[in-house]
Amino acid sequence: MAESTADTPPGADEPDGHEGPLAEFTALRQEILERVKAQQQLLTLQLTVTATIFGFAISQEDMTAVMLIVPFSSYLLCGRLVAQHFGTVRVAEYIDTRLSDRIPGGLHWESWLRRGPYKPHLLGSLLPLLLTFAGASALALSSTLGYVFGGADVGAGARIGLAAVWFAGLAATALSLMLVLQMTGRASIRSWRQTGLF
């Protein structure tokens, strides 16, 4: 038993104090991966829901008004996507500003990413996001324009209700547009710390 302690270097069994921060870093990176996965799922859900609503409205007679759902579902899903994005930004900021200094040599991935000029390109990610959320909503609103305000055989009360829903959908479309622009850094409408989305 004396030989085993003599062969062991001094301090080998003592923790060096970095296991905790490294374990925290691993958990936070896993959270980032889960948030990115959730963003992809929300994007898929948006495409599926929008295509289903459009397909149903086009295939059925007198179902044009169903397309008024699209601006609201798009806004709700866009809000969740943006919340996941800024949640990821918060985790990365914590790793960079609080956790990195507790590990010898630091954790430089987030700070390296932050230094690079990685603003989303218009055709790379900004335009697809705009088309997926605000674009789908705008298409739904334009498709229902004639039905809501024009020649459809709708009573006065129902027409007022449809018009109210249409204008609310227009507001939801504008909010989706602002959220995408804010997320991609194209418009600083409000600080992301004040959005209350996460």
Image (cartoon, rainbow, N blue to C red):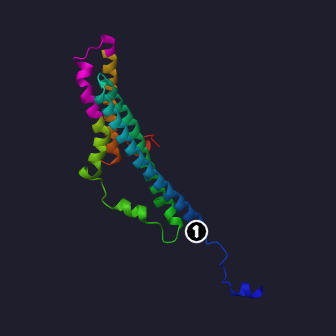
> Local crowd at mark 1 within 10 Å, few (<14), some, or many (≥20)?
few
Where does residue 25 sit, x and y in percent of width and height? 52, 61
Q: Which residues are magenta?
A: 137-158
Count of all numbered marks drawn on residues in the image = 1
- From the image, which quarter does the N terminus lie in? bottom right
Q: Residue furthest right?
A: 1
Is 167 above or below relative to 185?
A: above
- Dividing the picture into quarters, in which one does residue 143 lie? top left
| Residue 79 appears in view | yes
Where does residue 18 sit, x and y in percent of width and height? 58, 68
Give the camera-side residue of 16 and 155: 155
- Residue type, mark 1 in image: His
Name the residue tied to disc 1: 18
* Residue in the image at 48% along x and 52% along y: 34
Q: Is residue 183 magenta?
A: no
Q: Main secondary structure of the magenta part?
A: helix
User: Horizontally, is 37 left or right of 184 in the view?
Assistant: right
Q: Is residue 144 magenta?
A: yes
* Residue in the image at 38% along x and 45% along y: 44
Where does residue 198 sit, x and y in percent of width and height? 47, 43
Is 119 above or below relative to 12?
A: above
Q: Residue furthest top?
A: 156
Give the camera-side residue of 121 and 48: 48
- Dividing the picture into quarters, in which one does residue 158 lie? top left
| Residue 191 appears in view | no
Tag 1 secondary structure: loop
User: Horizontally, is 98 left or right of 117 in the view?
Assistant: right
User: Horizontally, is 26 left or right of 126 in the view?
Assistant: right
Is 73 above or below relative to 109?
A: above
- Dividing the picture into quarters, in which one does residue 49 lie? top left
Where does residue 141 sit, x and y in percent of width and height? 27, 29
* Residue in the image at 50% along x and 65% along y: 101
